[in-house]
Amino acid sequence: MADLAIINVYKPPNKPTKQLCELLLSIHKKHIKDSKVVVMGDFNIDWNKETPDKNRLHKLMVQQLDYKQVVTDPTNDYGSTIDLIFTNIDNFQCGTLETYFSDHKAIWISLSQ
């Protein structure tokens, strides 16, 4: 496998998505280049709802940087999918795990060669 970059994200609910996207784009341009990438974490943007924040993140990560968002199950006890995994890797498995001590589920990804 080529170089692998793993980026962990936490965006507080009250911080602008525009700021997050600018930071992710800057990291990509400076450090990622042609690497295999996993960007994962608590984005506090529900991937299942059409909102300006989701559309902004989709435009950057999926349309511009050509990553796919691979979490399909709800990631918290309220039914939303706000913990996300973006990757440009084709061979993987991923999912969620119950944590019992938080209203968030754990998200995971396993990469295959």
Image: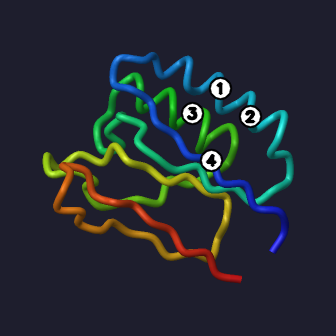
Q: Which residue is the site of mark 1?
A: 23
Q: Amino acid at mark 1?
A: Leu
Location of residue 72 in the rendering, given as x and y in whole percent from the top left corner: 35, 60
For the residue carrying disc 3, how many other residues have a C-alpha within 10 Å: few (<14), some (14-19), or many (20+)?
some
Cβ atoms under marks 2 and 4 closer than 8 Å: yes
Callout 3, which amino acid? Lys
The residue beneath circle 3 is: 59
Q: Where is residue 22 drawn, in percent x and y? A: 65, 22
Give the labeled residue for mark 2.
27
Q: Which comes sooner in the sequence, label 1 or label 4?
A: 4
Labels 1 & 4 near each other (Cβ < 8 A) = no
On the image, numbered disc 4 is attached to which residue?
A: 7
Going by the picture, which residue comes out furthest to the left? 78
Q: Nearer the viewer, mark 3 or mark 2?
A: 2
**Residue 17 appears left or right of 12:** right
Which sits earlier in the primary sequence, circle 3 or circle 2?
Answer: 2
